[in-house]
Image (cartoon, grey):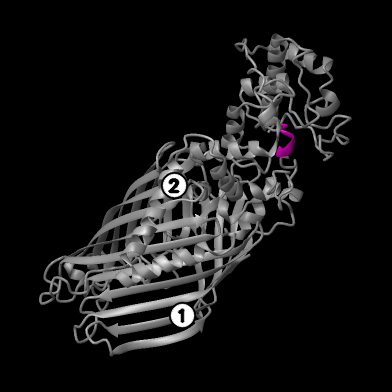
Amino acid sequence: MRFAIVVLFLCMATRILASGADNVGNRDHGKIVYERYCMTCHGERGNGAGEFAPYTNPKPRDFRKGTFKWRSTPSGSLPLVSDLERTIREGVYWTAMPSFFVLNPRARADVIAYLQSFSDRWTSEQPAPLLVIPPEPANTSASVQRGRDVYEAQSCAKCHGDQGMGDGESSKTLVDDWGNPIVPFDLTKGHMKGGSSSEDLYRVFMTGLNGTPMPSFSDTIKPDEAWDLVHYIQSLNAQNRRQK
Amino acid sequence: MMRKAQLLFVMTLAFNLWPKPAHATPAFARKYGVRCTVCHEAWPVLNDFGRQFRDNGYRMNLGEDDPPMTDPAYWPIYALASPQYRFDLLKSHDNKDLALLRSGQFQQGTFVLGAIGTVGAHASYLVIPLAVVNGQTVGFPAGWIRFNDIANTPWLNVKLGQNEPDLPFSRIRDLDMTSNSLVAYSYHTPGSVSQFDMANDEMGIEIMGHNRGSGTRYSVNAFNVGGSPAQNTKFNTPGTYGHVTHEFQFRNGPLTALEVGSFASYATWPRNLTQTPPGGLGTDNLKASEKYGGEVHAWFGQFALPIHANFTFIQGRDDKALVPGGVRDGLFNGGFAQVIANPKLPLIVFGRFDFVRNRDQSLPNASRDFHDQTGYTIGAKHTFEFTTRAEYALFVNYSWLRVKQGASDLTDTTRQVLSAGIHFAF
């Protein structure tokens, strides 16, 4: 019997020590993290078809394409691991994706390693270089007005509506890359899905949201115009707060 | 002891060979589309995510918590039940053939019907209008409303109503279904008339706060001690409880997280129920029992399949006036040490050691070890189905508790309880 107890404790100690041996990205451990926290939405096979997926809007991400919305890399590129880490840590406001801030950083790294296994892109490609975000200029009324001009010139109102409320003429016909209906974001709601800081907004304009109709404007607007657009969008939020 | 270790070993092996998939208050699972495993190491024991969720007032804080934001078809109603077979055996420890109590029967276990959720962006509630515990109906065992993030800070939340204090290890979230462990929470020095139980739901107010992620937390409760004379009609037997915790997380090494905490309670009780006012139930007649201590939690191994070890130490004191014939304040040490292991997602096994050791007896002729207690509990739970809608699980628990001089003839007693049944929730 003593032998059995010794074996039991050795098994537990081995498991403990083995789990501590990996600094980052243990795919096997990530599978368990995924099963515990992610699978009901993203599905057992990472196809975004978990049991709760039919009740969500927008739909959970299908990891098999290796296409991600929230990146700091150019449109079409894989995201950086730090981008995935940020999405997992902060969650996505106004969606079913919660913040997993409380997960141990090791667990987040493990689950990222696991979800990378759903797409071959992670073995055949490298993420493109990080988008460089220039310093933010002063947020002035002139900048806001110029941002309004950019908003009109880039036809943002076509989807997001003239007042930014997500009610543009195309808003009811948009679909994502998987054919699911998707509605443009109401820019007056307050919190932005991918983060509300100026840098977060700038990043969205210049990288786009892959898998959705939201394109990257990096080829059509200059950095200072992007900052003006950021200031205009922020003014829509401020107006909304004042009206409330 | 050796026999218990053998049993633990065999059960661990046996359950590891079983197939797969554990649970949550299903109302939340349905609302947020998460599995019970998101918030629980195994139901009902909370993990870090679940504790943060609870500390946030059962909100995810991502814009989807307000009732107007939820699907109109969603109802925040849930039910739990645990029908079981239970075998009780109370024996004289010294005379193995003398059974003071022997009973085995199928029981309803615990049945709870409740509602829980949010009534606004900054207000949460729990109402349990009905619970049945082994056939005994308990009306309104718990109900509260909580105002969250007062002044827009998570450091200030106020809960009003009847609720469990923030314990080192929650008793209503215990895996053990035998009710024969965690004895230090309710223990009083032998002869004390106080029935204060630190782990009971109490009617009062709780102020608590936490940082993001609930790594650092505090709670302070003020309440009227449950079960006291004229309870709940006025604040006639006041009590207080406080608890602070801090958790450290580790990225490398076998230790995933370490939490330390300390707590204290002070609860009054009338020493003489026969006195009549103004001297009777007034403050002059109130005497206190105190408990204070600390706890350490350590999580080893994989974050998603942790081995959770916990040691909680409690020192208690009862005023001698609470003990008829008492000659000095009663003083005792107690607590518990436990390990909860989660070898596979649907499986949880646990073992616990309980102890109470008296240091100063209040009764003049009592030996120092009079009513000392030693207990061992082991158990396992295997969940067969866990979805965003419901769960059901098989559980088996066994506990053994020895009380020194617990029998009327002052011989030691041992109480053994075996319970096995199905837990389901929807």
Q: The C terminus of chain B appears in which quarter of the rendering?
A: bottom right
Residue A140: percent from left, percent from top: 65, 11
Of residues B330 and B417, the one nearer the viewer is B417
In this orientation, does residue B53 appear?
yes
Going 59% across and 45% down the picture, which residue do you hit?
A: A31
| A202 displayed left or right of A217 | left
Magenta range is A63-67
Q: Nearer the viewer, mark 1 or mark 2?
A: 2
Main SS class of the magenta portion in the image = helix
Query: Distance between the Cα atoms at labels 1 and 2?
Result: 34 Å
Going 51% across and 48% down the picture, which residue do you hit?
A: B304
In the image, residue B209 sits, relative to residue B18, either above or below, namely: above
In this orientation, does residue A92 appear?
no
Of residues B159 and B283, the one nearer the viewer is B159
In the image, residue B219 sits, relative to residue B383, either above or below, namely: above
Please, which residue is most extreme toward the front here? A3
The subunit letter for the residue under badge 1 reads B
**Numbered circle sitting on residue B155:** none
**Residue that label 1 marks:** B86
**Numbered circle sitting on residue B301:** 2
